[in-house]
Amino acid sequence: MKLSVCFIALCLLPIATAFSLFKICPILDCEESCRDGRVEVDGCETCTCVDICEEAGCGKGSDDYTCQVISTNGYRRTKNGEVMSVYRAKCNKVCPPDPVCDKKCYFGSELKDECPTCDCKDICKEKNVECPENFRCEVNGSHIVGIGYPITWETGCVQDVCKAGEPEVDNNGFRVRCNGHEENTCSEGFTCVLHSNGDGSCCPGDQN
Ligand SMILES: *[C@@H]1O[C@H](CO)[C@@H](O)[C@H](O)[C@H]1NC(C)=O
């Protein structure tokens, strides 16, 4: 008895598999097209659209997060051969209004519970940049991998020429360069001090 049940099960399994592989799905007549694909039931598409934000479950239904749909460079092919862009869901923490801070953070703020604080990010420290003696680390450029990704900051070591204070930075936090010859690029109250390689920094005061 036991043996025959086992035999039937083994026999039915390949038949069931074969049926699902060659299953013929009903032709759908859906009103809307689905940006992120259709929900499938038993291997057949339905008219219900996939909701990538629901799948991402940002904050599991609490108000702490919002879901943002972001385009990617990816493509997918639908069952009927259409090529569609691929989007992804990004969960964003809902933060209270940004704190009012004394100083501006050019390269981002430190986060606490995913929300910005008044402490500025120290990119050089984060990247563990070590500069030779009498050189300082500075952020000197940026690049972006893609929409929705954080900015990648580039750093370099520059001669530390200011006797006192920090070199002048522009509106984006990058060091103002000067060469001492052409029109003075330093703001009032700053003096151009040349580096040994021809670069120059605007140092506060007259530096003499
Ligand atoms: C930043 O500094 C690095 C290292 O000194 C250098 O290779 C790079 O060219 C600099 N980038 C810019 C934009 O000046």
Image (cartoon, grey):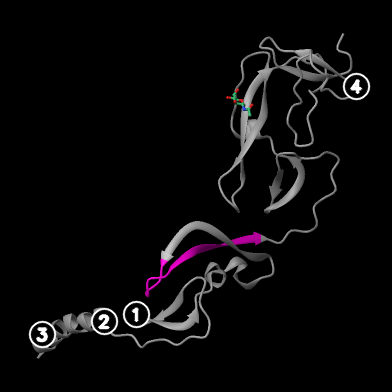
Q: Nearer the viewer, mark 1 or mark 3?
A: 1
Secondary structure state at the residue bearing disc 4:
loop
For label 4, the residue is: 189
Q: Nearer the viewer, mark 3 or mark 4?
A: 4
The answer to whether the residues at label 1 and label 2 have Cβ atoms under 8 Å apart is yes
In-image side of 59 versus 16 (left or right): right
The answer to whether the residues at label 1 and label 4 have Cβ atoms under 8 Å apart is no
Q: Of 172 and 63, which appears nearest the observer?
A: 172
| Mark pair 2, 4: CA separation | 78 Å
| Mark pair 1, 3: CA separation | 27 Å
Q: Amino acid at mark 3?
A: Phe
Secondary structure state at the residue bearing disc 2:
helix
In-image side of 191 versus 30 (left or right): right
Q: Amino acid at mark 2?
A: Ser
| Mark pair 1, 2: CA separation | 7 Å
* Residue 168 sits in quarter: top right
Q: Which residues are magenta?
A: 77-92
Q: Compare marks 3 and 4 and give the one earlier in the sequence.
A: 3
| Mark pair 1, 4: CA separation | 72 Å
Q: Amino acid at mark 4?
A: Gly
Q: Is residue 116 above or below residue 204?
A: below
Give percent across and percent down for residue 99.
Answer: 82, 50
Task: Say which mark, if any, is on residue 7.
Answer: 3
The answer to whether the residues at label 2 and label 3 have Cβ atoms under 8 Å apart is no
Q: Amino acid at mark 1?
A: Gly
In-image side of 177 versus 59 (left or right): right
For label 1, the residue is: 43
Task: Say which mark, if any, is on residue 20.
Answer: 2
Secondary structure state at the residue bearing disc 3:
helix
Q: Is 83 inside the magenta-drawn segment? A: yes
Q: Quadrant of the C terminus?
A: top right
Q: Quadrant of ligand 1?
A: top right
